[in-house]
Image (cartoon, rainbow, N blue to C red):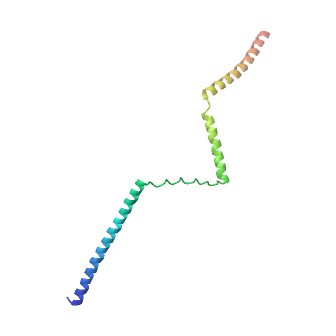
């Protein structure tokens, strides 16, 4: 092995070790710095908590004609469904039965009167 090769190999080895040592030292320092910053923020928030952030303002988006028509249609449909759900179906059934039985009685009462008159004339 010659002088130049040994010298260059030694310089390469030394600079590689110095670089790796400095890199490890820099990484450790940045990690410690981040930990200290985090702990400082945590302690500062315990002593004096930050002010609460205000709620975001609601955004209003204007709907187009088609969307407005859909909204009106849906509102009317919901109103109709609720009115059908609120109907007392038993009461409605009684009312319909009373109406049909009244019509039935009148129809057959007239025919019964016609039969009685026909029997009385005969």
Quadrant location, the C terminus: top right
Answer above or below: position of 23 versus 75.
Answer: below
Answer above or below: position of 52 versus 115.
Answer: below
Q: Nearer the viewer, residue 100 or 10?
A: 10
Q: Quadrant of residue 64?
A: bottom right
Q: Nearer the viewer, residue 82 or 36?
A: 36
Give the percent coordinates (x, y) of residue 95. Answer: 66, 25
Q: At x 76% / y 11%, what residue is drawn?
A: 119
Answer above or below: position of 31 versus 101.
Answer: below
Q: At x 70% / y 21%, what residue is drawn?
A: 102
Give the percent coordinates (x, y) of residue 24. Answer: 30, 71
Answer above or below: position of 97 versus 52.
Answer: above
Quadrant location, the N terminus: bottom left
Please give left or right for residue 90 compared with residue 48 in the image. Answer: right
Q: Is residue 70 visible?
A: yes
Q: Nearer the viewer, residue 111 or 92?
A: 92
Give the percent coordinates (x, y) of residue 90. Answer: 60, 26
Q: At x 61% / y 38%, what residue is drawn?
A: 81
Q: At x 78% / y 9%, what residue is drawn?
A: 120
Q: Quadrant of residue 19?
A: bottom left
Give the percent coordinates (x, y) of residue 39. Answer: 37, 59
**Circle count:** 0
Please give left or right for residue 81 compared with residue 47 in the image. Answer: right
């Amino acid at each position: 092995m010659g002088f130049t090769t040994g010298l260059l190999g030694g310089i390469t080895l030394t600079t590689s070790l110095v670089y790796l040592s400095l890199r490890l030292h820099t990484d450790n320092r940045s990690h410690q710095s981040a930990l200290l910053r985090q702990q400082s923020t945590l302690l500062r928030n315990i002593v004096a908590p930050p002010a609460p952030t205000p709620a975001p303002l609601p955004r209003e988006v204007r709907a187009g004609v088609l969307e407005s028509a859909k909204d009106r249609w849906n509102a009317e449909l919901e109103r109709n469904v609720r009115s059908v759900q609120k109907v007392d179906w038993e009461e409605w059934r009684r009312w319909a039965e009373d109406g049909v039985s009244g019509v039935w009685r009148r129809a057959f009462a007239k025919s019964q009167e016609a039969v009685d008159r026909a029997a009385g004339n005969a």
